């Protein structure tokens, strides 16, 4: 009851004040009829508060977002499934879901006719032009009576995540290094443990071709054994993104950093679809959530896009090199660079030396400030052996990627095809 009285609306307080005034005037003026009207006006908000306060409502909420991983500029739908698990009616519900401002305005709903066992679903759409990880919720619920005299508030504390990934473009197929194009990137691999007979055979399964039966192993084991198919070796690629603040210009979604992140996302999707196991490395080091793994294409691109969705400008001025201490060498390295300084050349030379094939997209960051286009980063990268293509703010990335392919094919004539590590 105390909570219900505290929840009196402006209308409810006005009724209460008017009733008290009427009763006071009736006593002073000796008007019993007016006192009866005043008592009725006072009793209405008090009675309403008592009824609303006695309601033992139990509201349940299930919030779902479809899809939970969406590209910037694309919509996602939020569905709210509400139910009343209490035994008494709740009157009218005023719902307001809290969403980050970049996803749009806060949706509000009015739900009526709530009773025991009541269930209802409402939905709304969100969209963001800004990449990132967002939490949708909590939801505020206000219960009011039909007269609008009392209003009680409740909050559902649960939230659901929504990840907005960078925009991507479909890239054309290009040669990724020498005679090796990257298409059909899976090569046969031999098993690395046990003897040849033990590791290349398995138990016979119904439907296996009898021509694949390995009779020597079958005689030794005492049951039919068949030759195992050669397993594919998944090619590996390192995607490097230079996200240092000193290497980029501009602000917000129009900055060169956002263009670099979008380019890296497009490359990640493209390489995954071509059969590569892709790991993401930034100026601060390797991202542990996107390290090399053997997954299906859809499962491979998800962690990469989620990692790129939350990439922020790094304040450090030097590139991290800890990720290059591993013993494996070779493979494909595709990098997206901002401004490159001469002090970066030792690290860039080391990256190129470790890679079997080193391709780079060099952003012309000066053009993001309105300055004339330059070729500083492209020239410096070319000095240490990178095959590069420049990307400006008005360039289409798929065309720049095609240009990089022509540069790669021209530069690799007469070179031995690089070996890809497994």
Image (spheres, grey):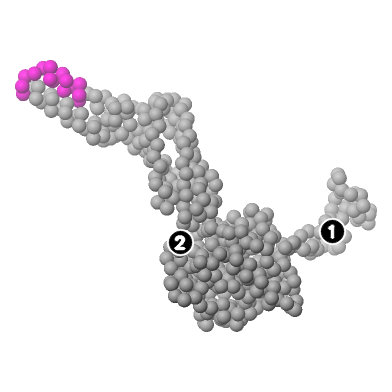
* Residue 276 % position (x, y): 68, 62
Residue of label 1? 200
Q: Quadrant of residue 5?
A: top left
In what element is the residue under mark 1? loop
Q: Residues within 10 Å of mark 1 (few under 14, many from 20)?
A: some
**Residue at the location (47% across, 32% down)?**
120
The range drawn in magenta is 28-42
Q: Is 332 left or right of 83, judged from the image as shown?
A: right
Residue 321: within the magenta? no
Q: Quadrant of the C terminus?
A: bottom right
Q: Is 408 left or right of 372, judged from the image as shown?
A: right
Q: What distance separates the C-alpha of mark 2 from that of mark 1?
A: 53 Å
Q: Is 34 left or right of 369, judged from the image as shown?
A: left
Is any atom of residue 49 visible in this view? yes
- Which numbered circle lies on residue 324? none
Q: Residues within 10 Å of mark 2 (few under 14, many from 20)?
A: few
Contact (CB < 8 A) between labels 2 and 1? Answer: no
User: Can you say whether 92 is above or below 413 in the image?
Assistant: above
* Residue 418 % position (x, y): 72, 73
Q: Is 148 left or right of 225, judged from the image as shown?
A: left
In what element is the residue under mark 2? helix
Residue of label 2? 253
Main SS of the magenta part reads helix
* Residue 363 % position (x, y): 53, 71
**Residue at the location (63% across, 67% down)?**
402
């Amino acid at each position: 009851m105390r909570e219900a009285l505290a929840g009196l609306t402006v209308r409810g307080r006005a009724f209460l004040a008017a009733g008290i005034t009427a009763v006071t005037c009736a006593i002073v003026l000796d008007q019993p009829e007016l006192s009866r009207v005043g008592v009725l006006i006072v009793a209405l908000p008090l009675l309403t508060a008592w009824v609303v306060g006695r309601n033992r409502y139990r509201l349940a909420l299930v919030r779902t977002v479809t899809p939970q991983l969406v590209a910037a500029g694309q919509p996602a739908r939020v569905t709210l499934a509400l139910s009343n698990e209490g035994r008494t009616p709740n009157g009218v519900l005023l719902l307001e879901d809290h969403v980050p401002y970049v996803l749009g305005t806060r949706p509000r709903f009015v739900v009526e006719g709530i009773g025991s066992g009541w269930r209802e679903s409402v939905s709304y759409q969100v969209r963001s032009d800004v990449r990132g990880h967002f939490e949708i919720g909590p939801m505020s619920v206000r219960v009011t009576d039909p007269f609008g005299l009392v209003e009680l508030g409740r909050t559902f504390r649960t939230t659901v995540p929504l990840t907005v990934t960078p925009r991507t473009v479909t890239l054309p197929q290009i040669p990724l290094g020498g005679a090796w194009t990257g298409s059909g990137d899976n090569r046969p691999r031999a098993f690395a443990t046990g003897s040849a007979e033990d590791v290349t055979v398995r138990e016979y399964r119904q439907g296996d071709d009898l021509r694949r039966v390995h009779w020597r192993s079958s005689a030794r084991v005492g049951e039919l054994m068949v030759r195992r198919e050669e397993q594919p070796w998944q090619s590996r690629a390192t995607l490097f993104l230079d996200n240092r603040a000193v290497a980029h210009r501009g602000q917000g979604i129009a900055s060169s950093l956002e263009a670099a992140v979008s380019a890296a996302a497009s490359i990640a999707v493209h390489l995954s679809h071509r059969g590569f196991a892709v790991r993401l490395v930034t100026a601060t080091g390797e991202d542990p959530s996107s390290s090399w793994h053997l997954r299906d294409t859809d499962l491979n691109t998800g962690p990469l896009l989620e990692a790129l969705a939350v990439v922020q400008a790094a304040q450090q001025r030097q590139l991290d090199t800890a990720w290059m201490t591993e013993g494996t060498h070779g493979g494909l390295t595709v990098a997206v660079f901002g401004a490159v300084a001469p002090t970066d050349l030792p690290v860039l030379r080391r990256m190129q030396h470790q890679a079997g094939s080193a391709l780079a997209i060099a952003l012309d960051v000066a053009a993001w400030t309105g300055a004339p286009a330059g070729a500083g980063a492209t020239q410096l990268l070319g000095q240490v052996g990178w095959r590069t293509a420049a990307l400006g703010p008005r360039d289409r990335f798929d065309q720049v990627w095609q240009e990089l392919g022509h540069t790669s094919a021209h530069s690799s004539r007469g070179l031995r095809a690089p070996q890809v590590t497994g």
